[in-house]
Image: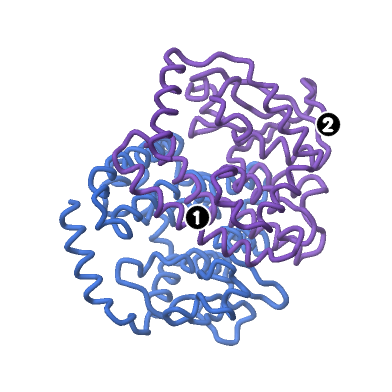
Chain colours: A blue, B purple
Amino acid sequence: MPVDPEAAITITAYDWVPDFAQGQVRDLRVRWALEETGQNYAVRYLSQGQQKEAAHRALQPFGQVPTYEEGDLTLFESGAIVWHIAERFPGLRPTEPAGQSLSLEWLFAALNTLEPPIMDRAQMTIFEVAEPWAKPRLPGVDERINERLQEASDRLGTAEWFGGGFSAGDLMMVSVLRIIEGAGLVEAFPNLADYVARATERPAFQQALTDQLAGFTGNPPPGFDEWMAELKRKQGELA
Amino acid sequence: MPVDPEAAITITAYDWVPDFAQGQVRDLRVRWALEETGQNYAVRYLSQGQQKEAAHRALQPFGQVPTYEEGDLTLFESGAIVWHIAERFPGLRPTEPAGQSLSLEWLFAALNTLEPPIMDRAQMTIFEVAEPWAKPRLPGVDERINERLQEASDRLGTAEWFGGGFSAGDLMMVSVLRIIEGAGLVEAFPNLADYVARATERPAFQQALTDQLAGFTGNPPPGFDEWMAELKRKQGELA
């Protein structure tokens, strides 16, 4: 579905993020869910810093994106929004109870078991990359990620999806695994790499990604280029 | 409700964990939800290492507790189980849509926004306490936690609960905030400290806690006392 300014659903997104975050900001998870369920939506873009202002905090107490508005309903937390969409519209949640359980548990596994060590890696390679412990600590973080990936790989086996048919649980598992794409971690498990490829080939994902990328029309904050150059230099030292 | 070996619902729990984890293992979240909704349940206890064996991994691919079984239904991930209980039985989920949204979003905020930095602190003060970066890295971790607590405190204000009435969202927020009780972080926000106190005074929480603690009848692994003495020594250096 095209993004439609007149749509009944409105989400929020950033009008600019650094290159490495483009295609990762969490409104992508919500856009993908809306595409899978055939819902069009409007986007209200926030420029640098607006997410921390009172007007946005009234919708999102932690000053982040995305939010979801539909009539009187407002929601924050991409996990909550994706699950709401899965319950509200057909397409992301199996109709039989066993499939619904699988969808629900893999959604939480993605956000509370896989994503914490994966975000710890982002912490080391981006936000703490200049700290003296970034390099010595990274192998232990990767070991924790690897253990989770092994376990997920063992469970997936030769299945196409974690929950029978593609569901909200798979949408979230893939969204989380994409964060470390290219780091060699997911790629070490061919069934997981194929799983991510299979999911991201879906037209709904491709449309959501295209629309997120098209929204980055804003400007970086002052000093961004210097910050980015320094980040790349430090990341080079980490490798 | 008392724990009842004949109950229709069975959860899994550990028969032993170190002192500092007693009252924190995640089956407590599920026990609490079952108490709030007036459901009795049976417990299958796992002794040291059993959680990583194939029989348990068939229920829980990551080799953790808790799991939830009821007839043909099995579930893992405490977040998924608590939400399932909230949807299945009255008592943890408001009946009007706005309250249901609040309950859902605060459940996810607890698990995906608050808990990751809070578990990062556990990583520094327990699992990585002997590493040279534990002490220099901890202040930055606490700063991230503090930012989230400030935002949660601002949103809670003078309200009793995040979602109108006590709900699954509050149950999970409190469960996560309890992890760092006594570290001076939550205590710096009197409304959050009161919120945790108000929730943990609930008879359902007290019963769940009592029952979890009563289940630790097993034995520690060989070498545990030496490991614990070393942990305490290292934690002393961190302080």
Residue wearing tag 2: B1
Seen in the picture, residue B120 relative to A44 is either above or below; the reply is: above
Q: Residue at x 23, y 50 (%)?
A: A132
Residue at 64%, 41% (x, y): give it.
A98
Query: In terms of secondary structure, where does tag 1 sit?
Result: helix
Residue visible at 63% across and 32% down? B23
Local packing at callout 1 (Cα closer than 10 Å; few below 14, some 14-19, many 20+) is: many
Q: Position of residue B19 (x, y in %)?
A: 57, 26
Q: Quadrant of residue A83?
A: bottom right
Q: Which residue is mark 1?
A: B145
Residue B227 on image: x %, y %? 41, 21
For residue B167, above or below residue A51: above
Q: CA distance from mark 2 to mark 1?
A: 35 Å
Identify the residue at the far bottom of this view: A6
Q: Amino acid at mark 1?
A: Ile
Q: Amino acid at mark 2?
A: Met
